[in-house]
Amino acid sequence: MRFLSANYIFPVSSPPLKNGVICLDDDGTVTDVIDTGANLIEREKLEFYNGILVPGFVNAHCHLELSHLANVINPNSGLPEFITSIGKIRKAPKEVIVDAAKAADEAMYRNGTVAVGDVSNNIDTLEVKKNSKIRYYTFVELFGLNENLLEEKKAAALLAKSSYLKAGLPASLAPHAIYSLSQSFWKMLQMLYKLSPPETISMHHQESGEEMNIFLDGKGELADMFRKNGFIKGDNVYKDDIFQQMLNCLNESSRCLLVHNIFSTKKDLERYSATKEKYFFVLCPGSNLYIQNKLPDLHLFASSDFSERTCLGTDSLASNSSLSVLEEMKIIQQYASDISLETLVQWATLNGARALGIDDIYGSFDTGKKPGVNLIAGIDFDRMKLNDEANNKRIAI
């Protein structure tokens, strides 16, 4: 049995406790959280830490298989150039991909990450995930605008999904983005979802302000890039009912993570309100700054309408300097200092666990859970903010 205390405990499912105590059994399961009324009494085996204790972090969006591309793509190149670069340079010997993924996985574990929603195009990182101390949910990414490749891509995606499931790793098929699937691909994916409804899916969402232009008028840098690379031909690809077609497909799932949301407005997000219980919004500020030097409307996601469904992700090392959830929290605080630390911790823990359907184990210090315990040091307790030098240390599994 362990008894952990700090300046503040953040149970997440309830308000922070000054000098509270977390009681853990030998395997890390929470047996009790004690509110001391800020009057901590010395007891045998009590471990006191300077800082705040929070549950293990949940990285709701990552691309582990791109870890070998760290420091390869120039920052601020813009989304069209970034997508083009990834397509050209992502291929590498499997041992290079695996070694980089393993190092990234180990770094995430050291940084207090307990669970990851990971996007994969293949099974290169399967063994890394299988042997990891982190719990992974794999989104097997599907994209295609060439109708002639539909059956080939469908078979490859289903084979990859099956391989993850056989390895005991939860997985589902997931669309890349609204602009990267043709009508036939959307219809095929919806049919597969109807046959076997997925628990959780993920999709890049409004990462570009031009994503709808591809279908409605074929204009903009993103459309030009797709046309240049032979992905689309002509001016128009879709009719104006593409959003409803996409929504019909996504609604087949129990939960859907919409990732990035850089250009999302309140009106955009309210389009999901009819089935809002299943939609979560994942912010990846480090990646957004790296690729486009632009952030989502952070205050929109901190509002009462959306805060309970907002999560944090890191994206990949191809578009970020680290896979640290704490660093994402620090970026948000830097650009929106009025968003409370309590809110940021919830985004980094419980909301991500709910989005991945694992909040029965992770995300909060509720009795019976085994969420891991992180110590965040470097706190300005007068303002209850992260200092620039704030750092994290895992102190319990």
Image (spheres, rainbow, N blue to C red):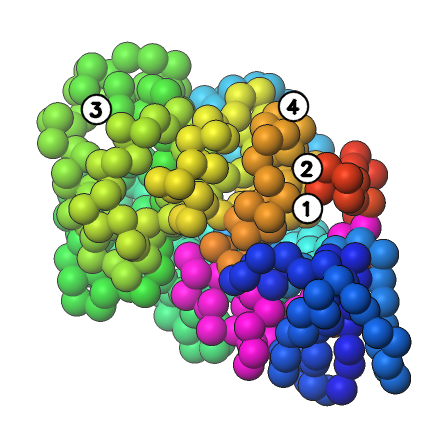
Closer to viewer: mark 4 or mark 1: 1
Q: At label 3, which amino acid type do we have?
A: Phe
Residue at (68, 46) in percent of width and height: 326
Q: In this view, does 183 lie to the left or right of 345?
A: left
Q: Gap in Å between the C-alphas at discs 1 and 3?
A: 37 Å
At label 2, counting other C-alpha atoms closer than 10 Å, the crowd grade (few under 14, some 14-19, many 20 or more) is many
Q: What stretch is highlighted in magenta?
A: 353-377
Check disc 2 and report the residue beneath it. 330
At label 4, counting other C-alpha atoms closer than 10 Å, the crowd grade (few under 14, some 14-19, many 20 or more) is some
Task: Judge whether 339 appears above or below 49 on screen.
Answer: above
**Which disc number belongs to residue 215?**
3
Tell me which numbered mark, 4 or 3, is placed earlier along the sequence.
4
> Element type at marker 2?
helix
Whether residue 366 is visible to the viewer of this picture, yes or no, is yes
In the rendered image, which quarter contains the N terminus? bottom right
> Element type at marker 3?
helix
Pointer 1 with pointer 3, Cβ within 8 A: no
Check disc 4 and report the residue beneath it. 74
Q: At label 2, which amino acid type do we have?
A: Lys
Q: At label 4, which amino acid type do we have?
A: Asn
Pointer 3 with pointer 2, Cβ within 8 A: no
Tell me which numbered mark, 4 or 1, is placed earlier along the sequence.
4
Residue at (79, 66) in percent of width and height: 39
